[in-house]
Image: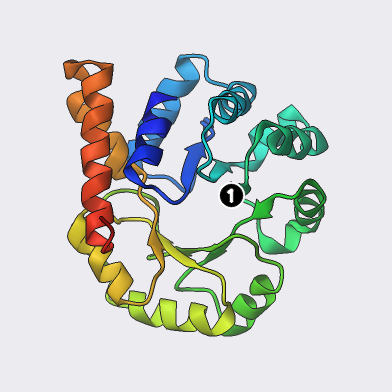
Amino acid sequence: GELVRELARRGADVIELGVPFSDPVADGPTIQRSSEEALAGGTTLAAILGLVGELRRGGLETPLVLMTYCNPVYRYGWERFFRDAARAGADGLIFADLPFEEGAESRRLAAAAGLNLISFFAPTTSDARMAMMAAEAGGFVYCVSLTGVTGARGSLPPRLTELLRRARAATGLPLAVGFGVSTPQQAAEVVAAGADAVIVGSAIINVLRENVALGPEEAVAKVGEFAAGMLAGLGRK
């Protein structure tokens, strides 16, 4: 909770809360490890929804998006999840392993609950498929910068500008780039390539892990400093 509040205080536009899953196929080693640790520590989907409610009751206004896989939601109860996520105060949902063709019921439930269901565009997504998905998209579009899994990387893929050009032709929604963004310089490059936002997960986990020995308060402060640097890379103060 303190980490979320610190990110909001630093100016994050949207905060993504990941739901740990035992087989996170879209994620690289960093988030795989953090998911294992969260599950071992007893973190559940219900607990995360409880956290969302707690944050809202505490006055947090920053939009919150839940990133999950289908299995935890299936076990929780599909309709119950959408209802409870909205009641808790979530604004959007990301399903890492839900193909568009199988997502009609989820889109219906999300719309009924007033939640944005986030779509993914990847370098392998055709123009026709982008147009089809854009017609049903809400909130923002998650542009996957490369084929592969999440994780901090030393450089951005050369075809990112082309991906963003095609994505912009398909939708007027904000374009957020994820998978590999980890430095203020990369954030600046992403914006220069045509994006509206960057999505940073693994790099934040790395900062937490590197500073955990300093204690919770100091580790959270270090993440706040990192977030401020990323926002500066986006041209924000």
Residue 196: image x %, image y %? 41, 68
x and y, in percent, of residue 30 in the image: 32, 37
What's the residue type where badge 1 is placed?
Answer: Ile
Q: Which residue is mark 1?
A: 94
The image shows residue 71 at horizontal and vertical percentages of 66, 36
Which residue shows up at 56% across the image and 80% down it?
A: 126
Work out whether 15 lies above or below 35. Answer: below
Q: Quadrant of residue 186?
A: bottom left
Residue at 38 percent across and 50 percent down: it is 150
Residue 148 lies, with reference to residue 225, above or below; the image says below
Secondary structure of the residue carrying numbered label 1: strand
Q: Is residue 169 left or right of residue 147?
A: right
Q: Quadrant of residue 68?
A: top right
Quarter of the image that includes the N terminus: top left
- Is residue 24 something that shows in the picture? no
Q: Quadrant of the C terminus?
A: bottom left
Q: Is residue 46 above or below residue 173?
A: above
Q: How is the image coloured?
A: rainbow
Q: Is residue 19 above or below residue 97?
A: above
- Residue drawn at the location 73% of the way across and 28% of the way down: 76
